[in-house]
Image: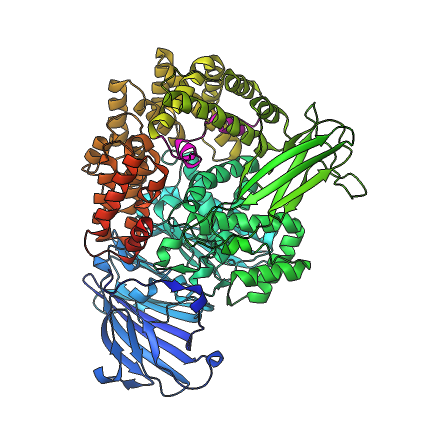
Amino acid sequence: MRTEQPKMIYLKDYQAPDYLIDETHLTFELFEDHSLVHAQLVMRRNPERGAGLPPLVLDGQQLELVSVNLADQELTDADYQLSDSHLTVHPTSATFTLDTTVKIHPETNTALEGLYKSGGMFCTQCEAEGFRKITYYLDRPDVMSVFTTTVIAEQHSYPVLLSNGNPIASGPGEDGRHWATWEDPFKKPAYLFALVAGDLWCVEDTFTTMTERTVALRIYVEPENIDKCQHAMNSLKKSMRWDEEVYGREYDLDIFMIVAVNDFNMGAMENKGLNIFNSSAVLARAETATDAAHQRVEAIVAHEYFHNWSGNRVTCRDWFQLSLKEGFTVFRDSQFSADMNSATVKRIQDVAYLRTHQFAEDAGPMAHAVRPDGFIEISNFYTLTVYEKGSEVVRMIQTLLGAEGFRKGSDLYFERHDGQAVTCDDFIKAMEDANGADLTQFKRWYSQAGTPRLAVSESYDAAAKTYSLTFRQSCPETPDKVQKLPFVIPVELGLLDGKGAGIALRLAGEAMAGATSRVISVTEAEQTFTFVDIAEHPLPSLLRGFSAPVKLSFPYNRDQLMFLMQHDSDGFNRWDAGQQLSVQVLQELIAQHQQGLALALDQRLITALRSVLSDERLDQAMVAEMLSLPSEAYLTEISEVADVDAIHTAREFARKQLADQLFEGLWLRYQANRDLSKKTPYVAEAEHFARRALQNIALSYLMLSGKPEVLAATLEQFDACDNMTERLTALAVLVNSPFEEEKAKALAVFAENFKDNPLVMDQWFSVQAGSGLPGALERVKALMQHPAFNIKNPNKVRALVGAFAGQNLINFHAADGSGYRFLADLVIQLNGFNPQIASRQLAPLTRWRKYDDARQALMKGELERIRASGELSSDVFEVVSKSLA
Ligand code: B3K
Ligand code: ZN
C-alpha cells in the first residue's frame, strides 16, 4: 500500500547503479508466525560511476529491521536512515560487506509478492520488485550477483527445502528443524531468486544435453497431484531438446526444478533453476484438464524454460526493457508450439487473441509502446503489448532477415551479452551486426504505441500488363501524444489468377520473376509497388501469415473473400478471408438490428462454411477455426461505438442460422468424431486435439437446434467420455441451453465429482460465469458464496469474475450498470489485499470509450468511485487515473 503519492518513473532518467553486489549470502529461518532473513552482501563501488562514495540506498518494503552491520561494524540508529521504502547507509571504502537481519510475515502476505504462503508451503514471487519485500537490497535487474541460500525450517511440515542452483549441503537442526544450502553459480538479478519449503512430492526424470551432460529434472507438487505431472515433464523435455536444435541453447545447471503452487498471481515464473508455477500451468491429465489446458501447460513450461537464456543468462538492464525478454520468449514459445502442433492453427489462435485484446489495449487509456517510456507501477506493464506485440516485433525481424539471418543474430546476441543486463537496442544491434542490416527505422516499433493502419488500393493496367498496389500507413493518436513516423511494415503477399493459382511475382525493375509469395517492406507513409507481366486482373492475398501487427484494409467484396477462402495457398489467409466475410455479414446484421429491420443472413456465408465443413482434406482443427464466428469481443474492438445488444443479437442469430442450415453436415462430423473419441483412448497430440475441436464446435452449434437427439448426444457425451475436453464442452453446451432440468443435474453431478479438485472447479465456475443467458450476475454473486470459491485465490477470481467481466459481454454491460458496479466493488475489495489482481480485473472498465454515452457515464462513474474509495495501491491508482485522464 502506498504512503506517498505515486510518481512516474522514466526511461530517460536511467542511471547505472552506484554500487554492485558480487555475492549474496542469504539465510532464511522460517516460522509459523514470522520469518527471519539474514543477508550478507559482498559489495563494491561501481567503477562506471566514478570516484567518491555516495550514500548506499537499498530498497526494502514491509521489512522490520533487526540489525544492520556495515564492514563488520554494528550500526546504531544514528548511522543509517530508514523510510517505508529504503535503508540508507554510508560506506567508507570501495569494497565492503553489508549484513542485515530483517523480520517479515509471509504467513499474512496476501499480495502474493515476495515470500508468502500458499496453502501449507512457503514460496516466493520476486519479479518485478518483490525481492525488496524479503530483504534490503539493490532490487533492480542490472545488479547481478551470485547467491547462496540456506533455508531452515521445521522438518515435519517442510521436508522439502529448495532454492536456486545446486544443492550443496543439508542436515538436521535443533527442535525438529532442518536446513539445506543451495548455491547458484550464475550471476543473476534478485528478481530471479526463489525459495520453496513444503511437504511436496516430486516426479523425476533426466535429460541428456547436446554435450552429453545429464540434468536431473524434478516437478514438485502436493502429494494428491503427483499423478498429473507427466504432461508437464514431457513438455519440459521437448522444450529442452527444441532449444538445442533451433537456437543452439543448452541448459547449464545440473538440476532443473518446477514447483506447482495453488496461489499465484500469474501463470509461472522463470526463477533460475527453480521455476515456480501456478498449478493450472503444470497439472494436466485427460480426466481433469482440457485439450486447451494441455496446450497451455506445454506452452508455459516451454516459455519459462526458454527464459533460461532469453531472460536469465541475458537479462534486462531496466524494466522498460521488459519486452527484451518477454517479447522474445513469447516468440520462441510460439515457434515451439507451432512445431509441436498445427502451425497454421497456432498462428490463427495467436492472431485472433492479439487482434481482439492487444489491439484493444493499444486503443485504450493504458496504451504504451513495446518499450514503454514511463510507468508508475511496473506490475501494470506485464501487458499484451509487451508480451504479444513484442513477440510480433521479433517475428517481423525474422521475416525481414530470414530464418538463417535471424539465427545468426540470436547467436551473436547470446554470445555477446551472456551474463549481462542489456537493452532492446542491444538485441537489435546484434541482429544488425550479424546480418549487415540497418534496422534504424524498424526500431520505431519499440518506441511508438498504437496499432498502425494500412489501407491498400489497387490498379490494373490491362494494356501494360501491370498491377499496382498502393499502401497508405497511419497510426492513431495515443495518450502519449507522440507524433508517429512511418513504420517498417513487412507485408507478405501473393497474387491469384482467375483459377486461384499463384502468379510468379516480378516487381518493375527486377530482372526475373520469382516466387509466388514474397515479402515487401512498406517504409513510407504512402508507397506503390508495381508488378509486371500480369496477364489478367489478379486478386491479391495480403499480409500472409499476419506478417505485421497492423489493421490492413482492402476493398474486397464477398465473392472475392469466398474465392480466397477456397484458393489461397496461405492457410492463415484462407481463415482470415472467412473472418472478413463473417465480419461483413455480421456488421450487416448489426445494422439491420439497429434499424429495427428483420434480420436476414447473407446466404454466401452459409455456402462458404458448407464447403469448409464438407472438405475432408482440410485439417479438422482448421475446419473448427473456420466455423468459429468472430467473437463479440472482436466485433466490439473493430466497432467505432460498440452496440452491445446489437452485436450479441446479430451473432446469436447468425449462429442459429448456421446451426439450422448446416445441421446435417455438422451432425455427420459430430457423430463420426464422437465415435472415434469413444474408440480412442485420450492422447494429447495435435491430430486428436483437432478431432475433438471439430466435434465440440459442431456440438455447440447442433444444440442451438434444440432437437432431442442432440440433447441425448450431449448427455451421452457428458456421462460416457473419458476426458475433460468432451465433458466440459457437454457441460457448457447444457449450461447455454434451455434444458433447465438437465443443466441443473449436470452441474450438480460435475461439482460432486470434482469438488476436491480446485482446478476443475475453476472450469465449473467459468462455464457458468461466461454464459450469455440472462441472470448471469446473480449466478456469479451466488457462486461467490460457494464453498469452492475463495476471493484470496487468484485462480478463483479469474475463473468467476474474470470470465464474467471479460467474456460475458452482454451481461457485464447490462444497461442498468449492475455489472460495472459489481466489478468496481470487487476491485475495491481486492485492492485491500492483492493490488496486482485488483488492477488486472479492472481492465474491462478502462474500455469505456468504446460504448454509448449512457454506458460511458456509468463506467466512468464506477472508476470515479474506485478512485475515491480510500487508499489505493499504486497498481490500481495508475490504471484508474490514466483511465479518467
Ligand atoms: N516473468 C514472469 C512474469 C512476472 C510478472 C510479475 N508481475 C512470467 C513470464 O513471463 O514468464
Ligand atoms: Zn515470460
Q: Which residue extends farthest right?
A: 511
In the image, is residue 210 above or below residue 339?
Answer: below
Looking at the picture, how far across and down is residue 593, in whole percent?
37, 21
- The image's colour scheme reads rainbow
For this view, does 113 lie left or right of residue 697?
left
- Give the image location of residue 40, x and y in percent: 34, 76
Residue 393, can we see it? yes
- The residues colored magenta run 618-643
Where is residue 91, by image quadrant?
bottom left
Vertical relation: 52 (above or below) 353 = below
Quadrant in the rendering for residue 296: top left
Given residues 221 and 56, the one toward you in this image is 56
Q: Would residue 54 be counted in the magenta stretch?
A: no
Q: How many marks?
A: 0
In which of the image's four quarters is ligand 1 placed? bottom left
Give the camera-side residue of 727 and 52. Answer: 52
Q: Is residue 208 visible?
A: no
Q: Is residue 568 left or right of residue 711?
A: right
Name the residue at the bottom extreme: 92
Q: Quadrant of residue 100?
A: bottom left
Tell me which residue sits at (24%, 60%) in the image: 1
Where residue 520 appears, x then y in whole percent?
66, 44
- Residue 814's spot in the image, x, y percent? 27, 31
Q: Is residue 58 left or right of residue 327?
A: left
Q: Compared with residue 582, is residue 863 higher up or lower down, i.e. above or below? A: below
Magenta highlight on residue 624: yes
Residue 40 drawn above or below residue 1: below
Q: Residue at x 51, y 63 (%)?
A: 423
Identify the residue at image location x=51%, y=20%.
Answer: 605
